[in-house]
Image (cartoon, helix red, strand yellow):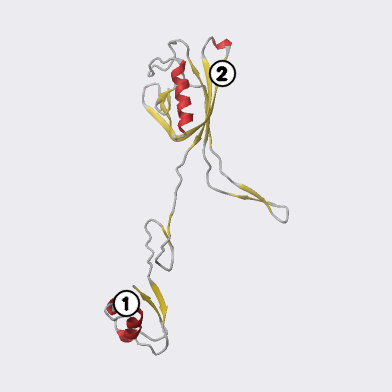
Amino acid sequence: MYDIYLDRMLIPINPEKISIKSKNKNELIELINSSELNLLKSEGLKDISFSFSIPAFKYPFRNTLSNWHNPNYYIDKLKRLKANRKPFQFIITRRYPTGKSYFNTNIKVSLESYEISDNADDFMDLTIDVELKEYRPLKTTTLDILQDKVSAYVTVPREVTKVFDQVVSTKEGELLWNVVRKRMGGVEKMAEVMTLNGLKHASDFVGGMVLKLP
């Protein structure tokens, strides 16, 4: 027993079969010695296709969970899904005849195409062929450009990148306090400079070192 939903719209009569195609985006490479190499890549997006009937009458075999709707209800729903250009849920619930749950399918998809067939042999019932494609949201990385700094950095979750105002080279024989005074207009931030550069004592500084300044 199956119940099939397109964005909360219950299919009135279950299709005979549903195809869910999953394939990798592998690439076949021909080597210089004429042999071939199959370059394995990650799984691609799933393709889903099926056909279902829209009954013109209240047949006893239609899905009893669904209220009676005329064909325009289903056609208008498909039109809206196509026009909205937004992903939605494709859900299949499966149950044993006893009512016990079997397993379910729940995939976010987009409506790629649908085709309506009106066959005289079906006596006013419509057939709709549907093609869906799995949807995966785009993952982005933020790039921050620091206009007042001398560098840029990419922000990645759970990683911290330190950015300094200045990185300066010093000359042999220079003393730390003299470098700080000349570069920063005073020695008020002497302790901050020592901490930033991992210096416990001013005497740990040796002229010719590269200094980070706040």
User: Image point 38% across, 67% down: which residue?
Assistant: 163
Residue contact between numbered discs 1 and 2, judged by CB atoms under 8 Å: no
The mark tally for this picture is 2
Q: Is residue 80 left or right of residue 27?
A: left
Residue 2 percent location from the top left of the image: 43, 24
- The CA distance from mark 1 to mark 2 is 77 Å
Q: Is residue 27 left or right of residue 92?
A: right
Circle 1 — which element? helix
Q: Which mark is residue 117?
A: 2
User: Image point 29% across, 79% down: which residue?
Assistant: 190
Report the residue marked by disc 1. 193
Amino acid type at circle 2 is: Ser
Q: Nearer the viewer, mark 1 or mark 2?
A: 1
Amino acid type at circle 1 is: Val
- Label 2 environment density (alpha carbons within 10 Å; few <14, some 14–19, many ≥20): few
Q: Quadrant of the N terminus?
A: top left
- Label 1 environment density (alpha carbons within 10 Å; few <14, some 14–19, many ≥20): many
